[in-house]
Structures are given as structure tokens and as C-alpha cells.
Amino acid sequence: MKKIEYVYFTIYHHCARRSYFPDSLEVRLKAMYLLALSAGGWILFLQLMYLRFIKNVWFSSHPLAMFYALAVYTSITVLFYRIFIVNEHDQKIFSKFESAWNNNPNKKRDLLIVSFIAALPYLAMMGLKLMMAK
């Protein structure tokens, strides 16, 4: 859980640095949505791997697949909204990692790693789609 909190803090800190009001609701929501987008991508990637390589099936139609993806993103977003914004867990995470972040010499490396981890499921899904295209 500590690694997920650090990932969230890295995203939150990056969004806060880009804003005039670092503690605003807009910054908190932006960080939460970016984490939800990443988590939703990982869930969809794992579902894709399960359906493609274990069950050897696909969704029966594109609208059904889109509805499933929207349901995954919506449920993850609502869950993260409850955890981070309503329960103010993001403020606890920020206060926990803030002092260590100022002494961290690898700030840019950590942001790059977090960005790569967030984009990896989408890149893998595109690569798999291109490899399986006939």
C-alpha cells in the first residue's frame, strides 16, 4: 500500500506544482483522476489478457466492450473519490511524504517511472492489438 501512496503523492505533487493554488479541490481531483485512469487501464489490461489468452474470446460487440470499459473507469473513479477526496486520505498521504520528497534527489526519475507505469497498460494493449491484427 505504501508504494501506491507514493505513486499518488508523486502525481499529486506534480499537479500541485503546476497550479497557483496547490491545495485546491481542482488539483486533488486531477491527481485522483490520473490515478483512476492508470488503475482502470491496468484492470482493462488484465481483463484483456484473461479473455484473450485463457478464455480465447473477445467481447461480442464494440458497444459492449465500450460499456464495460466505461463501467470499470466509473467504478474506479467513484471508489477513489470516496477514498481520497471524501475521506481526505490524499491530505494524509501528502503530509506523510512531503518532508521526504524535499530531500529526494531522484524527483524527476520517480515522476518518469510513475508516468511510465501509468502508460504501460495502454501501450501494451496497443502493442497486443497491432500484433494480433490480421
Image (tube, rainbow, N blue to C red):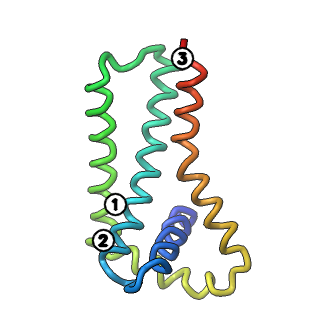
Q: Residue at x 36, y 73 (%)?
A: 28
Where's the C terminus, which quadrant? top right
Q: Residues within 10 Å of mark 2 (few under 14, many from 20)?
A: some
> Which residue is disc 1 drawn over?
80
> Which residue is disc 2 drawn over?
85
Q: Residues within 10 Å of mark 1 (few under 14, many from 20)?
A: many
State which tag comes first along the sequence, 2 or 1.
1
Q: Quadrant of residue 61?
A: top left
> Which residue is disc 3 drawn over?
133
Q: CA distance from mark 2 to mark 1?
A: 8 Å
Left or right of 49, for residue 103: right
Q: Identify the mark at residue 51; answer none if there is no mark.
A: none
State which tag comes first along the sequence, 3 or 2.
2
Instruction: Tell me the mark number nearer the camera, choosing from 3 and 1.
Output: 3
Q: Residue at x 42, y 59 (%)?
A: 34
Q: CA distance from mark 3 to mark 2?
A: 41 Å
* Relative image position of residue 96 (x, y in whole percent): 51, 82
